[in-house]
Each structure stands twice: as structure tokens, then as C-alpha cells.
Image (spheres, helix red, strand yellow):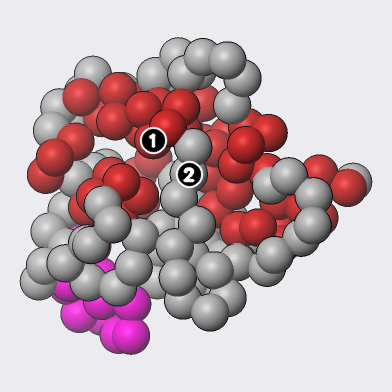
Amino acid sequence: MKAIVLAALVACGKSPSTPDASTAFCTDQTPAPTFANVQTLFSTICVTCHTTGAPLNLEAPAYSRIVNTPAVDYTDPAVIDSCGGTLVVPGDSAASYLFVKISSDSPCAGVRMPRTDIGTSAPLPMCAQNLIHDWIDAGAPN
């Protein structure tokens, strides 16, 4: 239960005094680049904010909501985000807005994800970034 609460606090940018859930997600190596592991990452870190009703819902199963799906403007989900392009372009992490948002210090819109409650970024550990990168570059298999 403590881990779930901790994940919820970290995912929306609260600042607990204990190590965060993103660090706990990774071990000494990057998990295998499968969608099951990507979904576990989303469920562990992202779904507290990115849930039903949010412009980007990463609750399980998120696959059809992210692969070959246009990124939407956070302020108006009916509008396609012109700088965002496509959330996940199978085989091309560099062209995948989801990967850009978690790996770039200066994405074309907003801040790096995940973010804190004051709007600054709280980057995922490299193993989590590598998991998303490697899964996308492997063709984003379901």
C-alpha cells in the first residue's frame, strides 16, 4: 500500500521524503522492451495523472491510445498538438512524442515528463527511458 501511495505522490509531482517510485521501478538493468513492461511503468508512475478523463489516459491497456495516435493539446483535447505529432511511431523513438516528452529537457511544448506540482520536470531514471526507447525502436509490439 505504501508503494502505491508513494507512486501516486511522485506521479503528480508531490515531493515525498522517501525514494520515489520511478527509482523503485528499475533494478540494475533495463527491463525487457515489451509492452507489458511499458504498461507496468505507466501503471507504476504515470496513471495517477494520466488516467480516465485526462487528455492522455495511460491506464491499462494503453496500447491503442498511444501507438500511431496523434498527440493532443493538453489545454484542448479536441485539438491535435501541432508540435507533438504522433505519440508512438513504431520503430522511431526520435519521432515519438511520448519518448521526446520523457527524454528531452526542452520538448517543443510544456516540460519534460513526469513533472512536479510546480511545473518542473522530475526525469525518469535512464532504465525507464531506455525501456520506452527500446520498445518503440523494436517496432512497439503489443
Q: Position of residue 104 (x, y in %)?
A: 26, 52
Q: Are marks 1 and 2 in contact (CB under 8 Å)?
A: yes
Look at the numbered disc 1 and give the secondary structure of its residue: helix
Q: Residue at x 23, y 62 (%)?
A: 106
Q: Which residues are magenta?
A: 68-81
Percent coordinates x, y for residue 77 in the rendering: 31, 78
Q: Quadrant of residue 70?
A: bottom left
Q: Quadrant of the C terminus?
A: top left
Drawn side of residue 58 relative to residue 96, left or right: right
Q: Count neighbours of disc 2 (C-alpha within 10 A) and say few if under 14, some if 14 to 19, many if 20 or more.
A: many
Looking at the image, is mark 1 or mark 2 earlier in the sequence?
A: 2
Q: Is residue 124 visible?
A: yes
Q: Is residue 13 left or right of residue 90?
A: right
Return the residue nearer the eye: 70 or 75. 75
In the rendered view, tell whether residue 51 sits above or below residue 26: below
- Residue 79 is left or right of residue 120, and the answer is left
Label 1, residues with CA under 10 Å away: few <14, some 14-19, many ≥20: some
User: Mark 1 sits on what residue?
Assistant: 129
State whether residue 73 is above or below residue 103.
below
Q: CA distance from mark 1 to mark 2?
A: 6 Å
* Secondary element at tag 2: loop
Residue 46 placement, left or right of 18: left
Q: Amino acid at mark 2?
A: Leu
Say the numbered circle drawn on residue 124: 2
Q: Is residue 59 visible?
A: no
Q: Residue at left 47%, top 18%? A: 30
> Could you tell me which residue is drawn at 45 percent across and 50 percent down?
123
Task: Give the vertical position of 139 relative to 104 (above or below).
Answer: above
Q: Amino acid at mark 1?
A: Gln
Q: Is residue 133 magenta?
A: no
